[in-house]
Image (tube, rainbow, N blue to C red):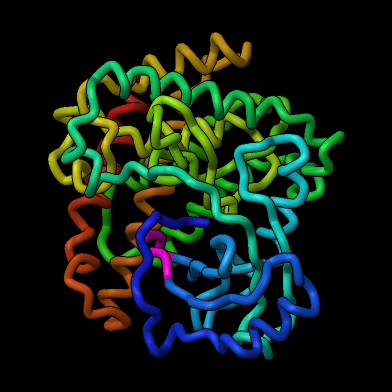
Amino acid sequence: MHYDSNTVPVKEEEHLDLSKLNQYLHRHAPEMGEVKEIGRFTGGYSNLTYCLQTAAKEYVLRKPPAGANIKSAHDMGREFRVLSLLKPHYPKVPSPIIYCDAADIIGAPFYVMEKMPGIILRAGNAPKMNIPAETYRQLSASLVDNLVALHALNIQATGLDQLGKPEGYVQRQVAGWTKRYYAAETDKIETMDAVAKWMEQNLPVNQQPAFLHNDYKYDNLLLNPDDLTQIAGVLDWEMSTVGDPLMDLGATLAYWFEDGEGEVFKYYNLTWLPGNFTRKEIVERYALKSGRDLSDISFYYVFGLFKNAVIAQQIYHRWKQGHSSDARFGALLPMIKLLGAKAEMAINKKQI
């Protein structure tokens, strides 16, 4: 559910049949009015996100990329259901409007939601915006507090418990991502072997299950343009599920690189900019606000780093097999090794 305020012209291979779309919307969502123009939002690497412009307002349409397996990460029906369940209990999500499971309207199932106003801070734009350190400090606190609020939702009362199976969640994640790593292995990386073995042998005590965003970081937050310390909306719910909430926090920590921890990571995040919390401060605030036991947080941080390394390994594996000519993908091996080394260091030092 990833979009910026700027749109780009729709490429030929991403074209939507405006006439068919308007016919469908006129029958099933007449309150929207006629779509006059379609653009595509920049940002995001998975599902395609379009801006639908009517005479009165703008809407957002999401559809899978061409050739995607819609039963996996591109399940539009599941995304729509997540928004529908969340919206009555958590206002910081776009209102879902309509879901279409037929592929003959625009070539794939899709859904339409409202467009929420806001600013997304990214590694590419934030360093140039001269945002004061105090603003980042307050925003870091807001980021943590908002995650605590998400994890405090009653999964039974909201119906969110139908989205996953919390029993054995951590064990399944460790086994699944370890399997994915070895399926995509190209080079022998001893640190990754050691981390995989350690995780299997050091599974934490189960936490009370909660609803997880699963990709919670700065560039999935919509900020109030008049006050960047206020989170107006949260985007990208395609990986959300129900399970151990500290897996969510661990994923956030694994994205959270501090200044001096590797120049390469400055191209991927903005958490190194002055004023941002340290990982230790994030953990302390989450513990204070949630009341949860974070004595095993290093495990969740290690898993987050390992998972990010596996994702990079899968991309590198596809490049090495000749399925991509993108030079950026061919340069990922040092990052995979760096993430593995960082995870092993966290294990040895027993800290984040």
Main SS category, magenta section: loop
Judge whether residue 160 is colored magenta.
Answer: no
**Residues in magenta?**
40-45
| Number of numbered labels in the structure image | 0
Give the residue at x 44% y 34%. Answer: 224
Spot occupied by residue 43 in the image (x, y as percentages of width and height)? 37, 60
Residue closest to the eye, 130 or 195: 130
Residue closest to the eye, 50 or 29: 29
Residue closest to the eye, 7 or 345: 7
Asked if one can make out residue 66 in the rendered structure from this viewpoint, the answer is yes
- Residue farthest along the right direction in this orientation: 157
Spot occupied by residue 320 in the image (x, y as percentages of width and height)? 26, 75
Residue 215 position (above or below residue 143): below
Give the residue at x 53% y 52%. Answer: 236
Spot occupied by residue 118 in the image (x, y as percentages of width and height)? 45, 43
Residue 3 position (above or below residue 10): above
Residue closest to the eye, 232 or 226: 226
Q: Quadrant of residue 129?
A: top left
Give the residue at x 22% y 43%. Answer: 265
- Residue farthest along the front direction in this orientation: 55
Asked if one can make out residue 196 in the rendered structure from this viewpoint, the answer is no
Give the residue at x 83% y 43%. Answer: 159
Question: In the shown orientation, is residue 13 left or right of residue 121?
Answer: right
Judge whether residue 42 is colored magenta.
Answer: yes
Residue 50 position (above or below residue 200): below
The C terminus lies in quadrant? top left
Question: In the shown orientation, is residue 61 left or right of residue 162?
Answer: left
Question: In the shown orientation, is residue 51 left or right of residue 268?
Answer: right
Q: Quadrant of residue 256?
A: top left
